[in-house]
């Protein structure tokens, strides 16, 4: 038996089945505290007080193994891989802990420590993004709820800054494409010309490229709208025509790690992050942008060119117009042009009104 005093109150500490129990006796007398410890130990052994000796809570390591087996059966491969990656991160912090030891306070410490870490392979010293931490917290939450347990996460843990998006200028686009190697240059061109998502371009198959009709069929996605027919611009057509004619496997963008032979078709490209970051540095672009921002750039340019929002939503594979509006980022020049158009419209309306009512307007906006 071991009791010790913390302030004016006596605490006890002991182990059962390799599990350390540390609790306050809420007593100020040492002898009484020792009796309370003995009673608490007996209650645990006998299965009272909500703690059963034959069935203690599992350790986090074991819970992760069971969760990943369940995830592999229930989730799509990409979602399962994300949970697996998040579990690797969570294990670095919660390995060998019992599930009931992972409290909201412990998770909050994890969140703060994780956000203070440098991003992996980041040469600019940037920190782990709040969105990355949130994905790990979402996996932790699901692990608990899947077992029927209350998650040790609070709503405020998931607060994050809105991820910054921006539109690439024409000058930046030219410098970036010139500095980009293959297959990044062709992938970026297809994204800029079609608005396709990076993974949609990565997974593009030769059989889904119709050079005669100049269309691309995207057969997968989370929604029905994502499964769509996409028209090719001239630049996208030239890139895909060259790629399709030279393809030696089912993939338009076959990974260099795969042989690409018919008997062993290899795998498609899954990431170009390092090549993308290197191209931005070589191009001398000061403000970093994500590969995904090329999709935002397509959407914004299409809106500026006069493409209506319903057509744009169909091109992007969005189920709702509201989602499409999040992708459109008017530039300062576009806003100025809109203001000038509104001003001209208002002036013309006033002039027409004055002309009809017989009043004189100071200046004819048409002159």
Image: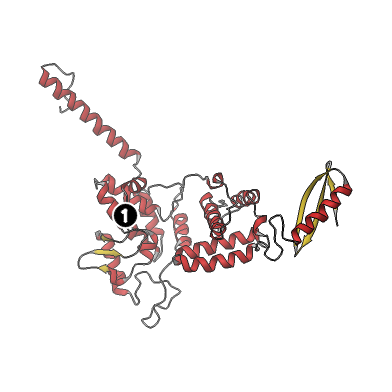
Give the residue at the far right of this rendering: 31
Question: Element under label 1?
Answer: helix
182 or 160: which is nearer to us? 160
Residue 364 horizontal/vertical position (percent): 16, 24
- Name the residue: 38% across, 51% down: 172
166 or 263: which is nearer to us? 263
Residue 136 horizontal/vertical position (percent): 55, 56
Quadrant for the N terminus in the image: bottom right
- Name the residue: 68% across, 62% down: 56
- Name the residue: 54% across, 63% down: 85
Residue 348 horizontal/vertical position (percent): 18, 27
Q: Is residue 48 left or right of residue 131?
A: right
Quadrant for the C terminus in the image: top left
Mark 1 lies on residue = 316
332 or 137: which is nearer to us? 137
Quarter holding residue 149:
bottom right
Q: Is residue 111 left or right of residue 229?
A: right
- Name the residue: 63% across, 62% down: 60
Give the residue at the far top of this rendering: 359
5 or 367: which is nearer to us? 5
**Colour approach in the figure:** secondary structure
């Amino acid at each position: 038996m071991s009791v010790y005093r913390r302030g004016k109150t006596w605490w006890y500490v002991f182990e059962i089945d390799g599990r350390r129990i540390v609790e306050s006796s809420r007593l100020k007398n040492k002898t009484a505290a020792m009796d309370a410890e003995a009673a608490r130990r007996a209650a645990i052994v006998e299965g009272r007080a909500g703690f059963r000796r034959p069935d203690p809570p599992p350790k986090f390591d074991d819970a992760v193994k069971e969760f990943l087996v369940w995830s592999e059966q229930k989730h799509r491969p990409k979602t399962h891989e994300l949970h697996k990656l998040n579990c690797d991160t969570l294990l670095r912090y919660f390995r060998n802990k019992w599930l009931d030891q992972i409290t909201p306070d412990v998770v909050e410490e994890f969140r703060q420590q994780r956000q203070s870490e440098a991003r992996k392979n980041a040469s600019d010293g940037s920190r782990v993004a709040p969105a990355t931490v949130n994905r790990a917290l979402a996996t932790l939450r699901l692990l608990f709820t899947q077992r029927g347990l209350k998650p040790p996460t609070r709503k405020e843990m998931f607060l994050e800054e809105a991820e910054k998006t921006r539109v690439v200028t024409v000058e930046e686009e030219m410098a970036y494409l010139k500095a980009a190697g293959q297959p990044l240059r062709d992938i970026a061109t297809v994204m800029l010309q079609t608005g396709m998502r990076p993974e949609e371009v990565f997974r593009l198959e030769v059989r889904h490229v119709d050079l005669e009709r100049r269309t691309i069929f995207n057969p997968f996605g989370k929604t029905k709208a994502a499964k769509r027919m996409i028209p090719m611009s001239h630049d996208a057509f030239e890139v895909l025509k060259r790629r399709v004619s030279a393809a030696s496997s089912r993939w338009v963008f076959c990974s260099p790690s795969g042989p690409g032979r018919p008997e062993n078709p290899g795998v498609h490209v899954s990431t170009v992050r390092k090549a993308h970051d290197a191209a931005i540095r070589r191009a001398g672009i000061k403000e970093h942008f994500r590969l995904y921002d090329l999709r935002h750039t397509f959407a914004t340019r299409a809106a500026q060119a006069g493409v209506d929002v319903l057509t744009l939503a169909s091109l992007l594979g969005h189920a709702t117009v509201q989602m499409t509006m999040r992708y459109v980022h008017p530039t300062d020049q576009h806003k100025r042009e809109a203001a000038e158009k509104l001003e001209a419209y208002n002036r013309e309306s006033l002039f027409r009104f004055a002309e009809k009512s017989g009043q004189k307007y100071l200046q004819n906006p048409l002159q």
